[in-house]
Image: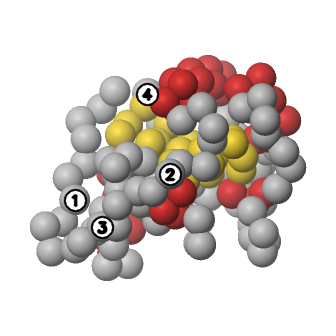
Amino acid sequence: MSKPLIPSATQAMKPMKEVLYIVVHCSATKVTQPYTAADIDRDHRARNWAMIGYHWVVERDGSITPGRPEQYAGAHVRHYNEHAIGVCYIGGRDARGRNADTRTPRQKASLHYLLRVLQESYPQARIQGHRDFPDVTKDCPCFDAITEYADLQPSNSSES
């Protein structure tokens, strides 16, 4: 794992409440575009956020970079942030900028590993994509996370 990002001392972050969701996102960047967790952090701070809104980022090479500490609510899915751990993979757009599942084999393996570890920490949490929340019109994460990670879902999980 990479070096953790440090929050801005000038911004207060809300504490996390009970974690009910583990949300998979894509960075919505072209597969050809160099982009990392540090770039997301920079872009989110430019929005005057305390730091990166995701708790974890899976880089193109499969490495896992910690983002916002899990004890703080993220900034990644409106109306659910205080109950959701955010995981973002770098990609989500093909070379022409169209939405696409651009995960590399290493990203797929790392995502599954990370989600399994998070599911162990939050056994009641449902794993789903950003697009699976009400009123979300984005295709993020550009694949069906509920189906992809069905083997990791809590046994009492129901459709949202």
Q: CA distance from mark 4 to mark 2?
A: 27 Å
Position of 6 compared to 21: left or right? left
Evaluate whether residue 4 shows in this view.
yes
- Callout 3 touching callout 2 (CB < 8 Å): no
The residue carrying mark 1 is 7
Closer mark to the observer between disc 3 and disc 2:
2
- Callout 4 touching callout 2 (CB < 8 Å): no
Residue beneath the point at 34% across and 27% down:
1
- Callout 4 touching callout 3 (CB < 8 Å): no
Type of the residue with mark 3: Met
- Is label 3 in a helix, a strand or a loop? loop
Closer mark to the observer between disc 3 and disc 1:
3
Neighbour tally class for label 4: few under 14, some 14-19, many 20 plus, Cα within 10 Å: some
Q: Residue 148 in the image: state x and y as whole percent.
A: 79, 32
Q: Residue 40 in the image: state x and y as whole percent.
A: 41, 58
The residue carrying mark 3 is 13
- Is label 4 in a helix, a strand or a loop? loop
Q: Nearer the viewer, residue 55 or 108?
A: 55
The residue carrying mark 2 is 18
